[in-house]
């Protein structure tokens, strides 16, 4: 399963991260790992767009998310969320 999120610019943590750096995709991925605690193995890409930080997750196992979902629940709280079935 894949899921796509957009975190609006107003919800990005600018106190601890230089938001201009998020225009670099590597830094956008690091933001997801360091501040949002998203496991690297689930990140397909992250990029800063006009609407906010776009994050695409891959290889999600619903049973795994039920057991270890703190990072996932945090991401759902701060983002506008769309599910993509695969």
Image (cartoon, helix red, strand yellow):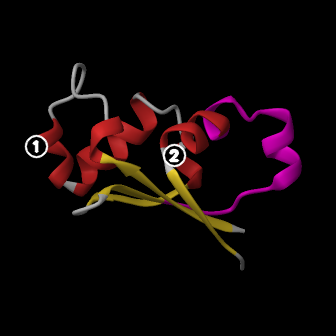
The residue lying toward the viewer, choosing from 76 and 16, is: 76
- Residue at image position (72%, 57%) is 60
- Residue at image position (83%, 53%) is 62
Q: Earlier in the sequence, mark 2 or mark 1?
A: 1
The residue lying toward the viewer, choosing from 81 and 36, is: 81
Q: Quadrant of residue 33?
A: top left
Q: What x and y, as percent, mark residue 28?
A: 29, 48
Q: Residue furthest right?
A: 63
Answer with left or right where residue 7 lies relative to residue 65: left
Question: Which of the numbered marks, if any, corresponds to residue 40?
Answer: 2
Answer with left or right where residue 1 lies relative to residue 16: right
Judge the density around disc 2: few (<14), some (14-19), many (≥20) Cα neighbours within 10 Å: some
Query: What's the magenta region?
Result: 56-72
Q: What x and y, as percent, mark residue 24?
A: 17, 53
- Residue at image position (72%, 79%) is 86
Q: Check whether the beta carbons of the residues at disc 2 and disc 1 lie within 8 A of each other.
A: no
Q: Nearer the viewer, mark 2 or mark 1?
A: 1
Total marks shown come to 2
Q: What x and y, as percent, mark residue 69?
A: 73, 35
- Residue at image position (34%, 40%) is 30
Judge the density around disc 1: few (<14), some (14-19), many (≥20) Cα neighbours within 10 Å: few
Answer with left or right where residue 67 lies relative to residue 2: right
Q: What x and y, as percent, mark residue 37?
A: 52, 31
Tag 1's secondary structure? helix
Quadrant where the image shows the N terminus: bottom right
Residue receiving disc 1: 20
Is residue 67 covered in magenta? yes
């Amino acid at each position: 399963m894949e899921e796509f999120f957009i975190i609006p610019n107003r919800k990005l943590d600018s106190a601890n991260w230089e938001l201009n750096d998020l225009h670099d995709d590597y830094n956008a991925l690091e933001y997801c790992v360091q501040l949002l605690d998203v496991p690297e193995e689930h990140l397909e890409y992250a990029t800063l767009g006009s609407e906010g930080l776009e994050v695409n997750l891959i290889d999600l196992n619903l049973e795994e998310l039920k057991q270890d979902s703190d990072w996932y629940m945090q991401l759902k709280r701060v983002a506008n969320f769309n599910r993509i079935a695969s």
